[in-house]
Image (cartoon, rainbow, N blue to C red):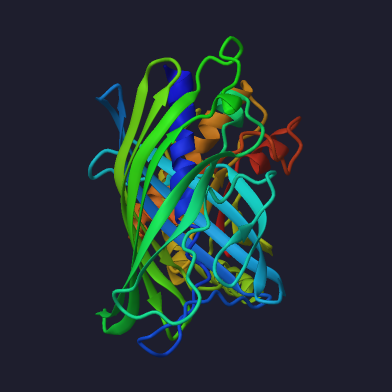
Amino acid sequence: MNKFYNFSNKFFKLVKLAVLSFMFFMPLQKTIAVEFKYIYNTGDKYRILSNVDEDVYLNRKYVQKAEIVNRISVEVTGTQGASGTHKMISVTSEKTNPVAGNTGSYTWGEEYETIFSRDSRGVYTISDEYFMPVVRDIPVFPEGDIKPGFTWTYNGHEAHDFRRGFGIEKPYKIPFIAEYKYIGPEIVDGKELHKIQVEYNIEYTSPSTEIPDLMEISDFPLSTRGYSNQTIYWDEANGMPVFYNENFRIQMELASGNTLEYIGSAEARVIESTLQRKAAEEDIKEKITKLGIKDASVKSDEKGVTITLENIQFSPDSSVLLPSEKQKLENLILILNDYKDNELLITGHTALAGTKEERDKLSLERASAVAGYIIEKGNWEEKRIFSRGLGAQDPIGDNSNEEGRQLNRRVEITILEN
């Protein structure tokens, strides 16, 4: 059960990740009769932060609840005619069976990088070497002006990553027909936005040519069915979406005879903030010195600005912060609170002691402890803070002596740019 459940849960998270990645490139004209076209400019960068709340059922019995955050960043790297070439990096992070009232960060997930092209109507050109985004050719717009009440349809498809679960090396594609309706302009939070509804149903049976040898592969989705009902809003002044929401239900019948079902909702917002890395780096260094925060250094790179807390102290072999470290973090929170429009990635490291599994587990627990303290004391949104543990994979000191081991027992706090 665990093998196919864990895989299928990963599959569905990627579905939601990609559903939320389609909304980057949709400017509007300045009349009620609008010709929707995607417009791309080399160097444009976009970031989307989305939330998914879902309940998971196995054979119609409730299994768990999951809260998922998808962080998607895209850069338009070039244009050709009306089409744009995009580089997309997607990360899916999750909390499983979250406890009400319990603050904590999301565990940083796997990063996917994708290169694809999209034309002015929204049609993708993408190689089968890429598995992101999962939902493709949605939305696709008709040619010419449309007015409120106008409806249209266009074929789309989902492309799933079944490599780990079923050994299928190319994206597994499930077709659908999307139904669109332009609702019209609407005032939201004092701004005029354009509202579009999108719906599609899935009713798909795997062709016999795509079903692997079940003697070699223990399980396989024989059929997939479900629906997605979405509402998308655009900001005409900025030429991009403001936010999106969705209700969904997906059910998979597996070759093993088991049924998996996912029921939930999702929403996403475009995050327009940017980080001036060098200016932020100098600002943070100055404030660290002023506040007297010891054993802390700052550097910037393409990912953002990273504050390294060297030799951070916990109770032995645990993730319980010592009082002295809590005071250090409270001073650091005064600095971090200036960057609440960005997200934080908290990375834990250990010295070379114990097994790899023990080191990885402890480093993640310590990163999560620091993240939780920042959330609690700094009043940060949980969905903006992620944690990960790298164990002893990235040492900066010599593990053969105590001085080096102290350097390696560190926590890094990265203010993310992309």
Q: Nearer the viewer, residue 173 or 52?
A: 173
Q: Is residue 114 above or below residue 190?
A: above
Q: Position of residue 164 (x, y in %)?
A: 59, 28
Q: Nearer the viewer, residue 284 or 254?
A: 254
Indicate the quadrant containing the N terminus: top left, top right, bottom left or bottom right: top left
The residue lying furthest to the bottom in this view is: 30
Q: Position of residue 169 (x, y in %)?
A: 66, 32
Q: Position of residue 21 (x, y in %)?
A: 50, 58
In the rendered structure, the answer to whether residue 395 lies left or right of residue 372 reads right
Kindly identify the residue that appears in the image at 55 percent across and 25 percent down.
Answer: 165
Indicate the quadrant containing the C terminus: top left, top right, bottom left or bottom right: bottom right
Q: Position of residue 187 (x, y in %)?
A: 26, 81
The residue lying furthest to the top in this view is: 215
Q: What is the number of callouts on the image?
A: 0
Q: Is residue 70 above or below residue 58?
A: below
Kindly identify the residue that appears in the image at 44 percent across and 48 percent down.
Answer: 176
Residue 415 in view, yes or no: no
Q: Is residue 135 above or below residue 210?
A: below
**Splitting the image into 4 quarters, where does residue 63 fall?**
top left
Residue 385 in view, yes or no: yes
Q: Nearer the viewer, residue 54 or 225?
A: 225
In the rendered structure, the answer to whether residue 211 lies left or right of residue 251 reads right
Q: Nearer the viewer, residue 256 or 352?
A: 256
